[in-house]
């Protein structure tokens, strides 16, 4: 199997949790001791062979890893260029990559003796994954979710409740993921002694961004082995959607030291960058502090956080993980923008072309791959992270079809 | 002399605890806010804590979250908050103003420029709720250069090692949050807070303010046995929102009287009020 998750600190973060100038832990003092305790427990866990073996076993027996690397021949033919492979994170238990992180973190929570787990969710995928591992480990689970997201992701809300979680609607602010995260942080500030905050993306205060990355790296580690076993070489391009950016950092990170592997992060363009209604923080935002880290944010000139917009609830967040901010400024990863319409079109092309319904988040990555592949040669290899399945998005897709008809 | 330092020195001479009154800048609008602030000193506020509106106030409970929303809806910005302080200084040149907010608006204004402009407007100190000691150095340097105090915060969860680290660079006063929670979310227990304040005091000679969860004058009075300053926020903000400026000023007077048991609020220097004898004499 691959190297341990703790063996690649060269890419950061530093002792203060910073990737270059990004990241850190900008949090009220009440939480700082809890973050330090989490850092200590995490370091001990990652160095503990028993912890790694247990995590590996749950990923194999329960999540269903490794996920396939599927050669999408119809899509390849249609695009006319690079060979397109899909890393099938949609085939994980609960239907997305989110569970990889949840398995790691629930083991940390258990190690810390916490019996109450809280989490934020946007599309509901992280909420479902958190509720799932809480059921498996017999822990109390409270999920914060924006009221607007509850309305557009009803099936995931029902799933969470069936799994025994309490779903608390957050009606303040924009009533989306950002506000759910505010409310989860307020809960944690209030109940810090008893509660574990299971944060779902590669953002938040240190150590969350690097912890989530390390638990998602399994995507890239498997991909690397699978493509080498199949083609005997590394891929030429990796493509993944970026909201907070956990699936993208998980795929990219094991390849960052290989300069021949180009990495493309795809942000949600909403109605288009020019409209101002988008979720593309790197392409359309600037650095600031939100939810405990310094990163690129959508904000106005007064430093007030702006509303994000995307057809995909999981990308509808006005920030991005700090490691992505660093990789953006260093130029190691290229960040592109795909708008709502292009993502919806890619959803249909993958459904009809390969028999796979992608999550609308992942459809952004598919759309960019369809743009990129024709500019590459037939000998080249392009891997798309299909981070989640699209069942949760059927109502949204049908509503847009109705508009188009 | 920095107005905050002068006030803290006067409180020490008077041997009484001071009242810190929190209101959100521009809540419910600029003019009402200006009218309220102009009367706070006379009503008995020893220090004005003025909230800087932010879209994502994670350390605030519902009352102050709503104040952020009202102020922003009325067009309040960081620049207008400094204008509000300048407006206050036309009529009150003595009551210190501590600006209290979150990192991002200050960062977007430009930290150095913000400190310079805040000092020029007549502010005396800055407290940023999401700026822990790990990231404070550049802000402290900028504050120092502008003549502002950067107020540090301690929490019930801060252990002794952490307290030593936080309090090494304390200036002005230390803000101790008496509860693990958001502003106004729970009612603090003065005895428990007293123990935490005593622990904090072992690491610093700076005056200690106690805040978060102070809702009644009697509670403020009990906290004053332990703390040099008592901060009242959510209760005042709620009163302003539901009953208006005059009611908010009445509430301020009630808290001020609780901290001056033997005189009328705002009636001038109190002499020889020994409150619990808890404070160490300081030079």
Image (cartoon, coloured by chain):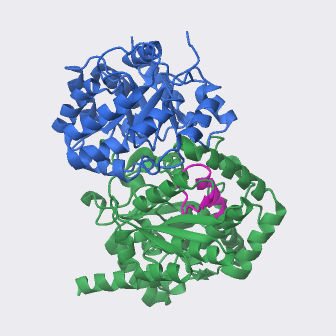
Chain colours: A green, B blue
B153 or A57: nearer the viewer: B153
Task: Give me the residue at 52% from left, 67% from top.
Answer: A239
Task: Tell me if A218 is positioned left or right of B44 in this view.
Answer: right
Using the rendered view, name the quadrant where residue B80 is placed: top left
Q: Nearer the viewer, residue A172 or B110?
A: A172
Up/down of B162 relative to A61, above or below: above
- Give the residue displayed 45% in from the left and 18% down from the top: B273
**Going by the picture, which residue comes out furthest to the right?**
A49
Residue B60 on image: x %, y %: 41, 48
Residue at left offset 33%, top offset 86%: A398
The x, y position of residue B61, in whole percent, is: 41, 51
Q: Quadrant of the C terminus of chain A?
A: bottom left
Q: Is residue A93 left or right of residue B71?
A: right
Note whether A129 is above or below A105 in the view shown.
below
User: Left of B155 or right of it: where is A228?
Assistant: right
Q: Which residue is painted at 43% across and 16% down in the image?
A: B5
Does the segment drawn in magenta span residue A209?
yes
The quadrant of the image that shows the N terminus of chain A is bottom right
* Farthest left residue in view: B31
Mark yes or no: residue A18 visible: no
Tell me how many marks there are: 0
Considering only vertical position in the picture, is A57 above or below A299? below
In the image, farthest residue toward the front? B262
Part of the protein shown in magenta: A194-215
Expressed as whole percent of the image width and height from the top left, the position of residue B118 reads 33, 25
The reply to whether residue A207 is in sight is: yes
Asked whether B148 or A12 is in front, the reply is B148
Quarter-wise, where is residue A317 in the image? bottom left
Place of residue B212 in the rendered image (x, y in percent of width and height, measured from the top left): 46, 42
Residue A39 in magenta stretch? no
């Amino acid at each position: 199997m691959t190297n341990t998750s703790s063996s690649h600190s060269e890419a950061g973060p530093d002792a203060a949790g910073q990737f270059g100038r990004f990241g850190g832990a900008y949090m009220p003092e009440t939480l700082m001791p809890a973050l330090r305790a989490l850092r200590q427990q995490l370091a001990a866990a990652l160095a503990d062979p028993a912890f790694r073996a247990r995590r590996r076993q749950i990923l194999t027996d329960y999540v269903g890893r490794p996920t396939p690397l599927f050669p999408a021949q119809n899509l390849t033919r249609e695009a006319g260029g690079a060979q397109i492979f899909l890393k099938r994170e949609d085939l994980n238990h609960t239907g997305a990559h989110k569970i990889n992180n949840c398995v790691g973190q629930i083991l940390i929570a258990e190690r810390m003796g916490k019996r109450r787990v809280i989490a934020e969710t946007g599309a509901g995928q992280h909420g479902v994954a958190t509720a799932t591992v809480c059921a498996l480990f017999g822990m109390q689970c409270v999920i914060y979710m924006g009221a607007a997201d509850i309305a557009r992701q009803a099936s995931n809300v029902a799933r969470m409740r069936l799994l025994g979680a309490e779903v608390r609607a957050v009606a303040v602010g924009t009533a989306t993921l950002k506000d759910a995260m505010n409310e989860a942080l307020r809960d944690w500030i209030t109940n810090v002694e008893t509660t574990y905050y299971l944060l779902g993306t590669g953002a938040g205060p240190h150590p969350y961004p690097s912890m989530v990355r390390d638990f998602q790296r399994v995507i890239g580690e498997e991909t690397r082995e699978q493509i080498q076993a199949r083609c005997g070489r590394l891929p030429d391009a990796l493509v993944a959607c970026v909201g907070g950016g956990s699936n993208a950092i998980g795929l990219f990170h094991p390849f960052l030291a290989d300069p021949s592997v180009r990495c493309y992060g795809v942000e949600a363009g909403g109605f288009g960058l020019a409209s101002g209604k988008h979720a593309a923080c790197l392409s359309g935002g600037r650095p600031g502090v939100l939810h405990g880290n310094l990163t690129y944010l959508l904000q106005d000139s007064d430093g007030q956080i702006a509303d994000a917009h995307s057809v995909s609830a999981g990308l509808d967040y006005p920030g991005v993980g700090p490691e992505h901010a660093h990789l953006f400024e260093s130029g190691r990863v290229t960040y592109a923008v795909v708008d709502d319409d292009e993502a919806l079109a890619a959803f249909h092309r993958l459904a009809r072309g390969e028999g796979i319904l992608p999550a609308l988040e992942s459809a952004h990555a598919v759309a960019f791959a369809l743009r990129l592949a024709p500019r590459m040669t037939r000998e080249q290899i392009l891997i798309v992270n299909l981070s989640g399945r699209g069942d949760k998005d059927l109502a949204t897709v049908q509503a847009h079809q109705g508009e188009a008809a | 002399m920095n107005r905050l330092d002068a006030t803290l020195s006067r409180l020490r001479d008077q041997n009484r605890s001071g009242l810190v009154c929190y209101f959100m800048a521009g809540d419910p609008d600029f003019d009402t806010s200006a009218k309220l602030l102009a009367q706070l000193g006379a009503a008995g506020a020893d220090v004005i804590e003025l909230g800087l509106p932010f879209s994502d106030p994670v350390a605030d409970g519902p009352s102050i979250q709503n104040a952020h929303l009202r102020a922003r809806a009325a067009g309040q910005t960081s620049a207008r908050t400094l204008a509000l302080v300048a407006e206050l200084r036309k009529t009150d040149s003595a009551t210190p103003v501590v600006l209290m907010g979150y990192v991002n608006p200050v960062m977007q204004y430009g930290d150095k420029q913000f400190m310079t402009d805040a000092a020029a407007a007549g502010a005396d100190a800055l407290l940023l709720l999401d700026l822990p000691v790990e990231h404070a150095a550049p802000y402290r340097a900028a504050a120092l250069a502008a003549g502002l105090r950067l107020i540090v915060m301690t929490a019930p969860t801060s252990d002794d090692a952490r307290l030593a680290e936080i309090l090494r660079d304390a200036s002005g006063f230390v803000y101790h949050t008496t509860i693990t929670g958001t502003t106004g979310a729970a009612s603090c227990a003065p005895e428990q807070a007293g123990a935490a304040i005593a622990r904090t005091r072992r690491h610093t000679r700076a005056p200690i303010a106690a805040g978060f969860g102070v809702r009644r004058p009697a509670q403020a009075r009990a906290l004053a046995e332990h703390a040099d300053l008592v901060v009242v926020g959510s209760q005042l903000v709620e009163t302003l929102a539901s009953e208006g400026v005059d009611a908010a000023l009445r509430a301020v007077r009630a808290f001020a009287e609780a901290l001056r048991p033997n005189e009328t609020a705002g009636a001038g220097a109190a002499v020889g009020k020994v409150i619990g004898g808890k404070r160490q004499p300081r030079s």
